[in-house]
Image (tube, rainbow, N blue to C red):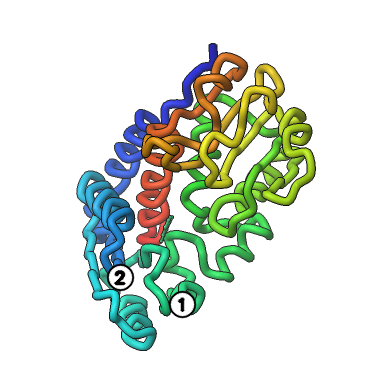
Amino acid sequence: MAIILDGKATAAQIRSEVAAKTAALKEKGITPGLAVILVGDDPASRIYVNNKKKACAEVGFYSEEIALPATTTQEELLSVVDELNHRTDIHGILCQLPLPKPLDDKAVIAAISPEKDVDAFHAVNVGRIMLGEYRFLPCTPAGVMELLHRAGISPAGKTCVVVGRSNIVGKPMAMLLLHENGTVTVCHSRTPDLAAVCRQADILVAAVGRARLITADMLKPGAVVVDVGMNRDENGKLCGDVDYDNVEPLASYITPVPGGVGPMTIAMLMQNTLTAAGG
Ligand code: GUN
């Protein structure tokens, strides 16, 4: 029986800590402001953006949604970003990804001022992560670290396996574990004998986006299992990258889906926006 790493409860705790610090900052005349750009009408992106706005309201931030049609040109989008870069009431800028075709995610990320890049996607912030000189940590890996810290789990001296190598999760996740003295292996879809590598893990982070890829036979008994996945199975049911029902009895700690890493991502976005505002 694993201990559940309850992201929903931990995220609520972090939001209340951010709210208290925001109240103190407001007394100095600063209200953290987050601008969220949403292009097109992707339903999943709409839900994410709504959740981000709701979290902003809860912690006492100013938030502004810039909803643009899918027909927006690259130039128009870049000029919106440029204007937000210059606004003193906006401390954080986030452009919800993916953008509709043919808009270029990379060009938009590059246009956001690194000091307002609360997703930590800009090359300058990615470079800072490599160097271990963080201002903003990318929200999902930061949320995973926070969940581990608050459960008293340290990567130091542990074998950590990250399954997935995305720029948003896998790569920075590996760096954060490494900075805390984990011994880290990054695996991916072309890793031969993925199961054998996963079985080495004291801490296993699954971030591949494949429903229930991580099965019980891939686990070292007693491992800490963190599931970043958010997938739909063949029946349309929400599930993670981990075969939860069969893995949970073997794990020491495990994150559920939903209610694990997901809520932590938004809590860390609030933390980053507070940092950007000087709180
Ligand atoms: N799309 C999926 N996840 C994210 C995220 O963390 N930030 C942004 N901007 N877009 C996303």
Question: Which sits in the foreground, 182 or 74?
Answer: 74
Question: Which sits in the foreground, 11 or 278?
Answer: 11
- Identity, as a three-letter code, of the amino acid under mark 1: Asp
Give the residue at x 61% y 62%.
128
Q: In what element is the residue under mark 1?
A: loop
Q: Which mark is residue 39?
A: 2
**Rendering quarter of residue 18:** top left
Q: Can residue 227 be seen by looking at this rendering?
A: no
Residue 98 located left or right of residue 185: left
- In the displayed structure, 60 sits above or below 92; it is above
- Identity, as a three-letter code, of the amino acid under mark 2: Val
Q: Residue furthest top?
A: 1
> Which quadrant: the N terminus?
top right
Q: Residue furthest front?
A: 234
Q: In what element is the residue under mark 2?
A: strand
Residue 88 located left or right of residue 164: left
Q: Position of residue 233 (x, y in %)?
A: 44, 38
Cβ–Cβ under 8 Å for marks 1 and 2: no
Q: Residues within 10 Å of mark 1 (few under 14, many from 20)?
A: some
**Rendering quarter of residue 133:** bottom right
Q: Which mark is residue 104?
A: 1
Specify the quarter for ligand 1.
bottom left
**Rendering quarter of residue 222:** top right
Give the residue at x 59% y 56%.
166
- In the displayed structure, 237 sits above or below 245; it is below
Q: Residues within 10 Å of mark 2 (few under 14, many from 20)?
A: many
Distance of label 1 from label 2 (alpha carbons): 12 Å
